[in-house]
Amino acid sequence: VLDENKLERAIARALSSYPELAGRLREGMDAPPRWKMFGTPNWLKPRYIWSKLAVDVVCNNQGVVFTVAKSEAPLAAFDGTGPLNDKLRAVVDTLDMNLIGTNKPLLRIKLTLLAGGGCVLGLSATHILVDGFSLMN
C-alpha cells in the first residue's frame, strides 16, 4: 500500500535538488527586445510580436502542487484502449499556460488512488524547464 505522506516527503526531498521546479517564472531582465514568431503552424503566414525572449526562473521555493484523488476506475481501465485523452485528464492536472510573471506553480503532481489498490502518479511541468524525458529522470 502506497503511503501518501511518505511520497509527499520524498517529493519534497527530491525537489531540494531541483529548486527551479519549486520556483516561479518572470520575464527576463537582460534580454534585448526582438521580433519573435509565435503561435502559427508552418503552413500559415507567420505572425510576429516584439518581445523579450529570455525568461528568468526565480528559485524562491514557492512550492509545487501535490494533490491526492480517488478514482472508482481500476488499473485495467488504463489499458490503452478507448479515448486516452479523457483518461489522462482524470489523472494529470494541467498547468496554466500563462506562467510568466505570475505566482503559479511550475510543477503539478497528482496521485490518483485507483479501485483495487493501484495508483497513477501524474506529472505536469512547464516545457520551459523540462521535457518529458528529463522530467522522468
Image (spheres, rainbow, N blue to C red):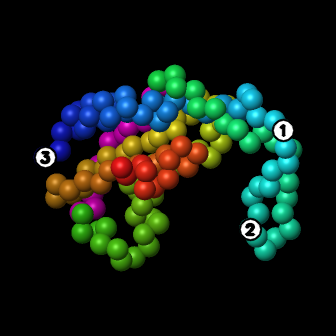
Q: How many marks on residues?
A: 3
Q: Quadrant of residue 90?
A: bottom left
Specify start and end residues of the magenta stretch as a single range: 62-74
Which comes before the other along the chain, label 1 or label 2? Answer: 1
Residue type, label 3? Val
Q: Indicate whether residue 67 is drawn in magenta.
A: yes
Residue type, label 1? Pro
Circle 1 is placed at which residue position?
33
Which of the labelled discs sits on residue 1, or is there none? 3
Task: Work out whether residue 86 or residue 133 is closer to the camera in this orientation and state it.
Answer: 133
Q: Residue 20, image x and y in percent? A: 49, 33
Is residue 51 found left or right of 16 in the rendered image? right
Circle 2 is placed at which residue position?
41
Q: Indicate whether residue 97 is drawn in magenta.
A: no
Residue type, label 2? Pro
Q: Residue 80, image x and y in percent? A: 35, 74
Task: Work out whether residue 116 or residue 56 is closer to the camera in this orientation and state it.
Answer: 56
Is residue 70 found left or right of 132 in the rendered image? left
Tell which tag, 1 or 3, sits nearer the viewer.
1
Is residue 37 found left or right of 83 in the rendered image? right
Element marked by disc 3: loop
Above or below for 41 versus 54: below
Element marked by disc 2: loop
